[in-house]
């Protein structure tokens, strides 16, 4: 049971969006070309209330990409993005969502961020995705989407930690690379953990 996990392919992470990832839109044709190769497809949406604590605008005197301590956790502050129900939170219009079996929305509580599709940033609160994947008999998870160094990275690491054989389809991902160098760093640490880094053409 091979499952494709499409992370946050949303307008706000694509060029012109509030938290645009360089070339973010380029993952869309790649994902569309491989989506039929999997037994099940799960897509996530970053889905924040307007008063979300990861938004710099909700912290007096702070600006995007500043770091703060939030309820005991380090939190990077972001421009307002993926506000629930906004156009920026919609999937990229060209993403073929017809084969998506399950949509998981994350980052929905104001007081905590959620980079991973499995666990919120307290590393305890579950989204429930592990239960879904286990109940359908998932043997392998393939992760793609945006952004490589945040939500893709944390989702892949959690999938691996939960016990799924995990691969990242690297040409179907794009990264933020803030701070600079974080892209190379996360790819190395995923490899080190035992996550396979694969190309879509090899699937
Ligand atoms: C993401 C930063 C803030 C992501 C989401 O999807 O990688 N990054 N929220
Ligand atoms: Zn977010």
Image (cartoon, helix red, strand yellow):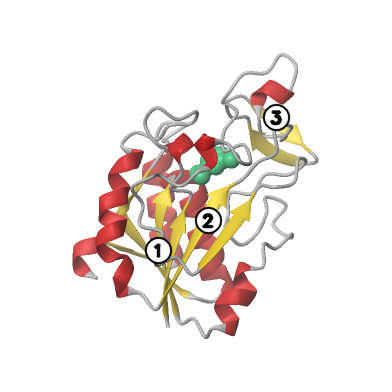
Residue located at (61% from left, 24% from top): 66
What's the CA distance linking mark 2 and mark 3?
26 Å
Q: Nearer the viewer, mark 2 or mark 3?
A: 2
The residue most toward the left is: 201
- The circle on residue 98 is 1
Q: Which of the 4 image quadrants contains residue 2?
A: bottom left
184 relative position to 87: left or right: left
What's the CA distance linking mark 1 and mark 3?
39 Å
- The circle on residue 68 is 3
On the image, the x and y values in percent for residue 25 come to 33, 41
Residue topped by disc 2: 44
The residue most toward the bottom is: 137
In depth, the one of 59 and 194 nearer the eye is 59
SS under mark 1: loop
- Characterize the local packing of mark 1: few (<14), some (14-19) or many (20 or more) Cα atoms within 10 angstroms: few
96 relative position to 91: left or right: left
Tell me: is circle 3 under 8 Å from ligand 1. no
Q: Is residue 199 visible?
A: no
């Amino acid at each position: 049971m091979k499952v494709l996990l499409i992370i946050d392919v949303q307008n706000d992470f694509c060029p012109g969006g509030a938290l645009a990832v360089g070339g973010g839109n380029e993952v869309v044709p790649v994902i569309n070309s491989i989506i039929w190769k999997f037994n099940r497809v799960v897509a996530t949406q970053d889905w924040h209330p307007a008063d979300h604590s990861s938004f710099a605008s909700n912290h007096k005197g702070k600006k995007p990409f500043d770091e703060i301590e939030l309820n005991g956790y380090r939190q990077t502050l972001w421009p307002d993005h993926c506000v629930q129900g906004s156009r920026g939170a919609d999937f990229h219009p060209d993403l073929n969502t017809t084969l998506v079996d399950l949509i998981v929305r994350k980052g929905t509580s104001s007081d905590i961020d959620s980079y991973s599709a499995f666990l919120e940033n307290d590393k305890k609160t579950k989204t429930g995705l592990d239960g879904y994947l286990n109940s359908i008999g998932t043997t392998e998870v393939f992760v793609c989407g945006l952004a490589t160094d945040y939500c893709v990275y944390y989702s892949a690491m959690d999938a691996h930690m939960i016990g799924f054989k995990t691969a990242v389809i690297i040409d179907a991902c794009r990264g933020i690379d803030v701070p600079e160098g974080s892209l190379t760093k996360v790819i190395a640490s995923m490899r080190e953990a035992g996550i396979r880094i694969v190309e879509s053409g090899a699937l």
